[in-house]
Amino acid sequence: MVHVVAHRGASLDLAEHTLAAYERAVEVGADALECDVRLTADGVLVCVHDRRVDRTSNGRGPVSTLDLAELAELDFASWRGGHGSAASVLTLDQLLDFVHDCGRRVELAIETKHPTRYAGLVEQRLVQTLDRHGWAHPRLGDRLPVRVMSFSWLSLRRMRELAPSVTSVYLMDRVPLRMRDGTLPGHVGIAGPSIAILRAHPAYVDRVHRSGGAVHVWTVDEPADVDLCLDLGVDAIITNRPADVLARARARFG
């Protein structure tokens, strides 16, 4: 059955990128969790989508100009009103610890955000962080529970050089002309098209599959879009509503 990936956690129900949102996603049965990572001023990877903290916290300013201690003083949940209690910024280390200890296999899809003032340092810190958890350089025969996603070709190339065993997903809001036949670069095994691409070009999924790749689609919340993905046989659905998507997939496949 299709894998269901909780986009920033169960982010329709709880504030995105908070531990509570990820706990809810695991409780409802998500196969994987998605997070975005940015580097703080003191070199720590934190789970924040926007370049600035203004939208998702009670603070202001770019993530890259704030150190972890400053971010830890902010509340990253109260902006959702009554949907959650106060929550500090979530570091990637903390999320990896949660995934490791959650009691079942849950995969993690990590998106590197670019452009950034720290350029290649993001990928270096990411590999160092994964290495601390044993998830950058697996033993022979092991399948890592982590993959890295990006809209940036350069980011994925850096990851390939630093940790070739980590699966890469090339995110797209449009399909480059040279890839419309379904082929992917040699170091990328998964296409990450938007749901808008699939609405306009549903045959793209079959082209990727015939070329030996997989398809992970973002961000799929509407029932009609979920049905389209199921009809097309995508490999993973990235959604803010993991419980609803799982229920719809189970109703289809039993």
Image (cartoon, grey):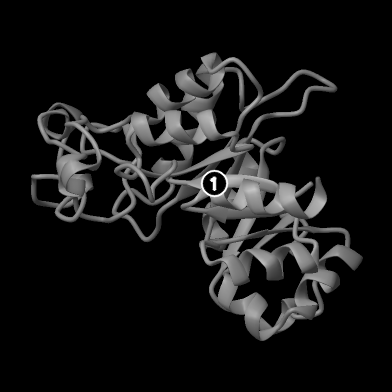
Viewer-side residue, 23 vs 137: 23
Task: Please report the residue visible at 66 percent of the width from the left and 30 percent of the height from the top.
Answer: 145
Q: Amino acid at mark 1?
A: Pro
User: Can residue 4 be seen here?
Assistant: yes
Q: Is residue 110 above or below residue 205?
A: above
Viewer-side residue, 8 vs 157: 8
Coordinates of residue 127 in the picture (x, y in percent): 52, 32
Mark 1 falls on what kind of element? Answer: helix
Task: Please report the residue visible at 36 percent of the width from the left and 29 percent of the height from the top.
Answer: 19
Which of the 4 image quadrants contains residue 161?
A: top right
Q: Residue furthest right?
A: 210
Asked whether, in this view, residue 211 is left or right of residue 221, the answer is right
Task: Please report the residue visible at 12 percent of the width from the left and 35 percent of the height from the top.
Answer: 74
Task: Please report the residue visible at 16 percent of the width from the left and 48 percent of the height from the top.
Answer: 79
Coordinates of residue 33 in the picture (x, y in percent): 53, 39
Viewer-side residue, 185 vs 105: 105
The image shows a total of numbered marks equal to: 1
Q: Which residue is mark 1?
A: 242
Which of the 4 image quadrants contains residue 206?
A: bottom right
Coordinates of residue 181 in the picture (x, y in percent): 81, 79
